[in-house]
Structure formats: structure tokens, C-alpha cells
Amino acid sequence: MRITRAVVRPPADTFAAGITSSRLGPPNLATALAQHDAYCRALERLGLSLLRLPPDPDFPDSTFVEDAAVVTAGGAILARPGAASRAGEVAALREVLREWFPEPAEIAAPGTLDGGDVCEAGRHFFLGISDRTNPEGAAQLAEWLARHRFGSSVIDIRTMPGLLHLKTGLSWLGDRRLLAAGELAEHDALRGWEVVRVPEGEGYAANCVRVNDTLLVARDFPATSALLGELGYDLVPLDVSEYRKMDGGLSCLSVRW
Ligand code: GLY
């Protein structure tokens, strides 16, 4: 589907209190806000209308809006984040999506699901089982997808080091092509897909965002950008260093449809 809209939410002044395992030090809020602004401007330049939620200091991770809802060509599903401190983020997504999706599906207990574990690849979805998304949550989404005539396959990333979410290491590049890092690139679920491997040492660059004919990519990963450029993609490099410090990436910063 052609993407025309995105929900975004800047980080609040509590951003540094969010969950992280990165050991890259605390984020600088002013820099994070400037990076968020550049991200939003890039989406607008690509023709998207933005729905801007206000920063919410009660939820330090709430700038990572992608984890709270999944929007597909068949409708929206409210997620059920696996981290207790993030559960309350869903209400704002329910509200902002209401105009387009008045009756979204919802992941129900005991299922948990973070949108970062949902990698759309056209009519197929890869669903990550992670420390945030449990098998029950993934099964609920798979069932909803099947009812809407989408395919899905599950990838358990719990033993794969360095992956918070599936999309930390996997992105759809369009058609039958995926970008994948590390052992994910070899996973059986990707058989039959063309897998572009992220060059050694640039694993963070695996999280990119396809917006129609353009790819938003993390800045400062030259080997990955060169590879994607050679494949003919139009790239928009964006600096997301402050979000990386909080285990986030480009895709986490918006819900797109
Ligand atoms: N800081 C992003 C997350 O842990 O969900």
C-alpha cells in the first residue's frame, strides 16, 4: 500500500529514564528533539501527513510509537507492550487512530506484542517472538492476519544477541527483498526471499524504513548505505544516535500507513 500518513511523538524530558540495554550513555534531549524534527521533516518531504502526539513525560519510551499499534492494509491492531512501563502508551494510539480505524483489533491478555516485532513485507508479515512479544501475542496477530488474507511466519529471536525486537535486525525493502543482520539473515523463515545482508559491524543499520520509493536509513553506516545505493534505492540518511542509546531506531519513531 502507498503510505500517506504517520503518527509521531517527540521524546519527553523523561526520555533518559526509558528502558535501555545499550550502554551508550544517556541521550541528550536537545539533540534527540532535533533528530526527531529532522525525521518528521523527512517524512513530510516524502509527502506524508503527520499526526503529532504531544510528548508524554509519564511514558519515557513513548516516542517509540511503533510498539503500541500495528497498522496494515486490512486495518489496525492495538498492541499490548511486553514491558509493564509501556502498557499505558496504547491509549494515545487508540485515540489518534480513531478517525481512521474506529474499531481496531486488540491483542488480549495473556498475549503481549510490541509493534517492533512485526515486520510487514507486502502481503506477508514476519512476527518476532522476543522478550516483549510472547507466543500467545504473536498467535493472536497471526490469526487476525490470516482472517485478512495476509500470510505470516514466526521468528524466535530470544536467543539472538543484541536484538530487542525483530525489526532491530530485519527490514522489508520492497517486493521479495529483505535487509537482515547477523544470524537472522540465515533464518529458515526467510527462505524464498532475497536477503540483503547488512555488512559486518553495521548491524544497527538493519533497521530502516521504506516509505514508498525511498528508504530512510541510519546515518553513519557507510557500507550498508553503499550496498543499498548500488541496489538502486533512493536513500535518506538520518541521524538517530540519541534513539540508539535507548535501544530504538528509525522504524520505532512512527506508525505509518
Ligand atoms: N527503549 C525502548 C524499549 O525498550 O522499548
Image: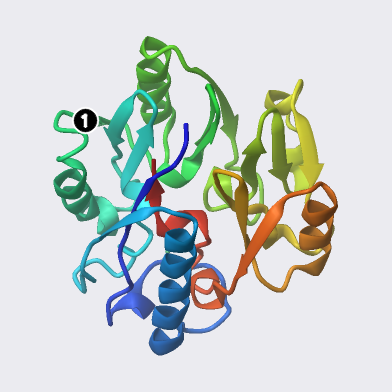
| Residue 138 in view of the camera | yes
Q: Residue at x 53, y 53 (%)?
A: 164
- The answer to which image quadrant residue 175 occupies is top right
- The image shows residue 163 at horizontal and vertical percentages of 60, 52
For the point 78% across and 52% down, which residue is it? Answer: 228
Residue 44, quarter of picture: bottom left
Q: Secondary structure at mark 1?
A: loop
Relative to residue 144, is residue 175 depicted above or below?
below
Mark 1 crowdedness (10 Å alpha carbons): few <14, some 14-19, many ≥20: some
252 above or below 178? below
The residue that disc 1 covers is: 104
Q: Is residue 148 above or below residue 198?
A: above
Is the CB of mark 1 within 8 Å of ligand 1?
A: no
Q: In the image shown, does 21 or 230 lie closer to the viewer?
A: 230
Horizontal side of residue 25 vs 66, given as left or right: right
Work out which quarter of the rendered image holds the C terminus and state it.
top left
For the residue marked with disc 1, what is the amino acid? Pro
- In the rendered image, the vertical position of residue 10 relative to residue 46, given as above or below: below
Image location of residue 102, percent across then percent down:
14, 32
Can residue 132 be seen here? The reply is: no
